[in-house]
């Protein structure tokens, strides 16, 4: 595999790894020398594991809905069975919420968004931490969002869920720093993904309009474009490696500068 083996000998679990940032992160960790357990609710998770193995790495795929306590409880033994240990947890699995103001948001939509985006990282951390505490290189990387740092239009559930992930990251860093477990978060900005296949379920015209709107919004950032998933993945590898050994409780924006400036629009 290509790239420096900064994660050689370590075992990583990446959730939501069937596509987008999760898939890119799993592949990047495999390229950095880690053995990678990938999980998702989608059958496409197998392709992620197969691609890591085809490139010369070690990987296993595990089906899991991170919002389900019993499924997450069973996930960790699956990692141990495959690789015998766990050093890195990347909480990436997430869903997008609808585009409504809060009073228009259904209770079902709110509950589902919080269940996957915030309860999921809680459950994965809860069941993984006892194993992580046996590692001398333990790290949790939570994938939050710039929407967890600022308000955004028509995104109440999503903003609330990702804001929770941001402060959960800080809280875990406080509780577990003395045990040598580092916990950091990445807040991506506009990234060239289709979270949860949202656009795939739209008509061709609606999907094209949604993508065009994202690209227009991203163009207003200082760097003027969306990120690729690989650009987020490289930061996840860094935060999991010894290169970031004195970082914990850090909230790292990878957003093309969007949270650094007031957007004056046109």
Image: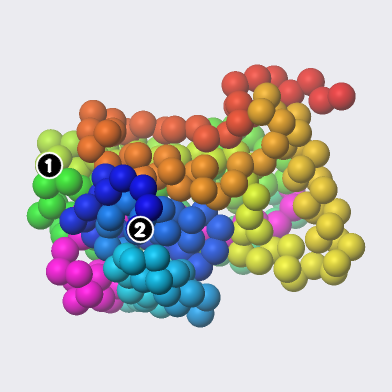
Tell me how far mark 2 sits from mark 1, CA to CA.
32 Å
Circle 2 residue = 1
- Say whether residue 97 is magenta: yes
Q: Is residue 138 visible?
A: yes
Q: Name which quarter of the figure residue 176 lies in.
A: top left
Name the residue: 52% across, 58% down.
94
Judged left or right of residue 244, residue 40 is: right
Q: Name which quarter of the figure residue 51 lies in.
A: bottom left
Residue 219 rendering spot, x and y as whole percentages:
76, 33
Counting labels gives 2
Name the residue: 85% across, 69% down.
203
The answer to which of marks 2 and 1 sits earlier in the sequence is 2
Residue 196 rendering spot, x and y as whole percentages:
61, 64
Please say if 160 is above or below 264. Answer: below
Q: Of all residues shown, which one is farthest toward the right?
A: 205
Q: Name which quarter of the figure residue 14 lies in.
A: bottom left
The quadrant of the picture occupied by the N terminus is bottom left
Q: Nearer the viewer, residue 166 or 54?
A: 54
Please say if 101 is above or below 37. Answer: above
Name the residue: 84% across, 57% down.
208
């Amino acid at each position: 595999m290509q790239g420096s083996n900064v994660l050689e000998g370590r075992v990583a679990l990446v959730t939501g790894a069937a596509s987008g940032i999760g898939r890119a992160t799993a592949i990047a960790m495999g390229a950095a020398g880690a053995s990678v357990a990938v999980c998702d609710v989608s059958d496409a998770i197998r392709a992620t594991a197969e691609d890591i193995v085809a490139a010369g790495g070690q990987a296993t795929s595990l089906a899991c809905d991170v919002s389900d306590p019993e499924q997450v409880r069973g996930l960790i033994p699956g990692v141990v069975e495959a690789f015998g240990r766990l050093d890195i947890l990347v909480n990436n699995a997430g869903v997008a919420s609808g585009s409504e103001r809060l009073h228009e948001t259904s209770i079902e939509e709110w509950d589902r968004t919080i269940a996957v985006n915030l309860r999921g990282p809680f459950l994965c951390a809860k069941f993984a931490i006892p194993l992580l505490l046996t590692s001398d290189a333990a790290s949790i990387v939570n994938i939050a969002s710039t929407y967890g740092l600022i308000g955004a239009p028509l995104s109440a559930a999503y903003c609330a869920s990702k804001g929770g992930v941001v402060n959960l990251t800080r809280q875990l860093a406080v509780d577990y720093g003395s045990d040598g477990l580092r916990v950091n978060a990445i807040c991506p900005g506009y990234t060239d993904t289709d979270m949860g296949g949202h656009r795939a379920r739209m008509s061709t015209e609606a999907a094209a309009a949604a993508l065009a709107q994202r690209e227009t919004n991203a163009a207003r950032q200082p760097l003027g474009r969306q990120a690729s998933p690989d650009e987020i993945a490289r930061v996840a590898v860094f935060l999991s490696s010894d290169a970031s050994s004195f970082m914990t409780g850090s909230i790292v924006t990878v957003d093309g500068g969007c949270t650094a400036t007031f957007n004056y629009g046109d």
